[in-house]
Image (tube, rainbow, N blue to C red):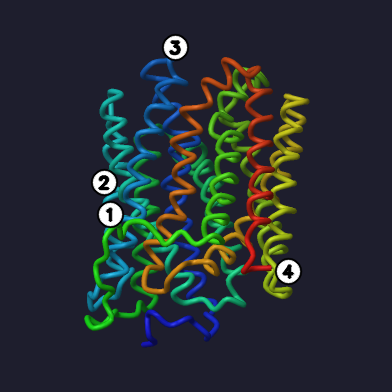
Amino acid sequence: MTDPLAEPVAPVRRPWVAWLFLANLGLWLGIYAPLQVLLPQQVELLDPVRKEFLFGLVTGVGAVVALVVNPLVGRCSDRTTSRWGRRHPWTLGGALVGAAGLAVLASAASTAAVVAGWCLAQAGLNGMLAALTSAVPDRVPVGQRARVGGLVGISQMLGTVVGAVLVTVLVSGLSAGYWACAAAVVLGAAAFVLRTPDARLPEAARPAPRGGSLLPRWRPDFAWAWGAHFAINLGNGFGTLYLLYFLDDVVRHPSPADGLLVLMLLYGVALVAGAVVLGARSDRSGKRRGYVHLAAAAMALAALLLAVWPTWTAALVAAPLLGAGFGGYWAVALALLTQVLPAAEDRARDLGVVNVANSLPQVLAPLLTPAVLAHLGGYRGLFLVSAAVTVSAALLVGRVRSVR
């Protein structure tokens, strides 16, 4: 087994990438199928009048849990000397805790129970996320990272599509949907843990405890890249978290859930194309920033389209445009972010902090969206804000100097 702290040089093979993809697919399905479909429906059944507020409350509190768990589990896995490896115990353990939270949601009959179940699910799933994300800089050489990062991005967005199909077409009812998500999470994690190696950290190489060790060394390039990642995810959150309600209240789609499924399918196909094309081009050229600019521009254009033309036709155009942009961004961003990590011995902790840039928008977007809808012109204003925040990501990544 190679040195777990060394920069990897041997290309990873297709089976390893396939198992990583499967584990990430189960993880994101377990997060996004509830966020996009199950939780909005469950909250609306509990209180149809205050559905926006309660949905924001549930997702916001759950995301706060994610903010803490990501760097905490990352720090713990960086220092784990188990004979099963540093990451695998946390991957499987997180999956089991996340599945338990989804099981609580399957029978939740009150807002308090929904909050508790989603918090437990977020704790487990974000612990799993911290461990899985660390596998990329642990095992994948720099020249291969955008292509592998593209597949990780595809798994994230494909999780939204497969999750929507799973809980709207293949199974019926909230309870069955949550149980199906729980099974997907555990199966994906177990397959990756059982079928791939994980380097064991020797006791002598275990990093010494440091004061404030949940926080990274905020070197400038890491800070700018983190800010760009945060902005992209916040812009995406503004544009997608309330999409079901947008289809219902503004577009007046006769079946909002079915409409959302169509949009997610278009989004997913375009995302795969964007991730594969931009990831391969980025690895061949060794350049990252220009491709992030291109991806952010596509996402901002999609939001602007919905702002000026809030119709079902516009949504059919915007969905693949947003998908291509987000897929291309994720392919390049994961490669860029792993290249600016401050220290090899803290990879998982620092990537856990990077993952906060995924989770923090889940706190802010639900909290800020009701105010935007009320005071900035409804959904038109919301999509304009989404476009502006996304453009700011391109400006921030332009400040990164150590990566082209």
- Helix, strand or loop at label 4? It is helix
- Quarter of the image for residue 401 reads bottom right
Give residue 45's position: percent from left, percent from top: 40, 20
Residue that carries the numbered disc 4 in the rendered image: 281
Specify which label sits upstream in the sequence, 3 or 2.
3
Q: Nearer the viewer, residue 393 or 386?
A: 393
Q: Is residue 21 above or below residue 47?
A: below
Give residue 184's position: percent from left, percent from top: 40, 53
Q: Nearer the viewer, mark 3 or mark 2?
A: 3
- Count residues near mark 1 (Cα–Cα under 10 Å), then give few for <14, some for 14-19, many for 20+: many
Residue 159 shown left or right of residue 315 in the figure? left
Residue that carries the numbered disc 2 in the rendered image: 100
Residue that carries the numbered disc 3 in the rendered image: 49
Verify CB contact (< 8 Å) between mark 4 and mark 2: no
Residue that carries the numbered disc 1 in the rendered image: 96
Most extreme residue toward the top is 49
At label 4, which amino acid type do we have? Arg
Q: Is residue 369 above or below residue 215?
A: above
Specify which label sits upstream in the sequence, 4 or 2.
2
Mark 1 and mark 2: span between their CA atoms?
6 Å
- Count residues near mark 4 (Cα–Cα under 10 Å), then give few for <14, some for 14-19, many for 20+: some
Q: Nearer the viewer, mark 4 or mark 3?
A: 4
At label 1, which amino acid type do we have? Leu
Mark 1 and mark 4: span between their CA atoms?
37 Å
Residue found 53% across the figure and 43% down from its top: 165
